[in-house]
Amino acid sequence: MTLSKTQQFIEDDFFKPLYEKYKGLMEETPEKVININGVERKRTKELLHKEFEKVLSIVNNKFPVYLSGPAGTGKTTIASKVAETLELEFYMNIKLTDVFELIGFMDAKGNYVETEFYKAFTQGGLYFIDEIDSSDPSVLVAINAAIANRKMVFPNGTVDANEKFCIIVAGNTNGSGANENYNTRNLIDAATLDRFIILNIDYDERIEKEVAGGDGNIVKLVNKLRTIDTPFRSVFSTRFIQKFVLLKNQGFSKEEITKILFTDYDTYYKNEVDKLVDAALKSKNGRKTEKPATLSEIFDI
């Protein structure tokens, strides 16, 4: 079919520029097939962390996994998505400071009070401990037998693990104790660490770009910030991107954003990243993080 000049104009000079500008909104996310041992387990359009399938494969073989990495890299999300993919209940604790948080206790009436760990261990499910390196190391020793022998002594008796019991833990360190950025973390007993496969979970730039609404300028900014040395500890995680995008979309000024998100911006960051901040604030090529309410909002008219 031959297009008229008017139709050609509309095709070339109207729709194509709009498509190029907003193709991120219009193009459908490709479906990803998740396989386990060569068998299709799930189809999803979610953007999963680059290390997700490694974790999934290990957990599917009932081997405990320790996810080690900086704050905000998606460790908790990985664990919950593994449970979802394997169709397991997800049970979670954030650090353990008392052994009774793990094994439970008998109340004044002689009734056993269950814990998240007990439910996962006896009923089947994925048990996740976040901030394990902030836990009391002596409490973690209690979990060794459960992992090694799949048998555990609880106040109401000795129990064998359900065949569907799995465990993932996560920390900002690899269990070797405090460091410059995480100076309150505990040293984890070597016998406990020996029971886990330790995987390093770093920031995934694909996910960060998605969080930034497709705006590569924001990702460039946060990557640069991670290289700057300052006298204080600053974490520029994926959560920083979420905050930056939120404040930008809500119309906060550059001065307001830098005051909210940085400690002493003018002294330690301005010379290094000021142009990147400007580019990230001025950029309009990224997708909005929330669906625009009207057509005029989508096409800026």
Image (cartoon, grey):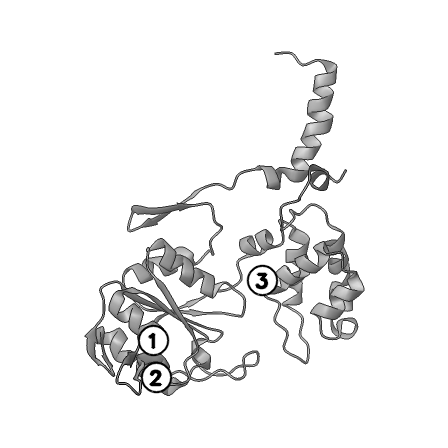
Mark 3 or mark 2, whichever is nearer to me:
2
Mark 3 to mark 2: distance in Å?
34 Å
| Marked residue nearer the N-terminal end (2 or 1) | 2
Residue plotted at (44% across, 60% down):
78
Residue plotted at (47% across, 49% down):
46
Tag 3 secondary structure: helix
Mark 3 to mark 1: distance in Å?
31 Å
Image height check: is 109 above or below 224?
below
- Local packing at callout 1 (Cα closer than 10 Å; few below 14, some 14-19, many 20+) is some
Mark 2 to mark 1: distance in Å?
8 Å
Residue plotted at (61% across, 41% down):
25
Disc 3 marks which amino acid? Thr
Disc 1 marks which amino acid? Thr
Residue 183 in percent (x, y) is at 54, 83
The quarter in which the N terminus is drawn is top right
- Depth check: 106 or 177 in front? 106
Residue 113 shows in the view: yes
Image quarter of residue 273:
bottom right
Disc 2 marks which amino acid? Phe
| Contact? badges 2 and 1 (CB < 8 Å) | yes
| Marked residue nearer the N-terminal end (3 or 1) | 1
Residue plotted at (38% across, 56% down):
84
Image quarter of residue 196:
bottom left
Residue 271 shows in the view: no
- Left or right, 17 with respect to 111, comes to right
The quarter in which the C terminus is drawn is top right
Tell me the tag on residue 238: 3
- Depth check: 251 or 9 in front? 251
Residue at the spot of label 2: 100
- Left or right, 162 with respect to 292, comes to left
| Marked residue nearer the N-terminal end (3 or 2) | 2
Residue at the spot of label 1: 115
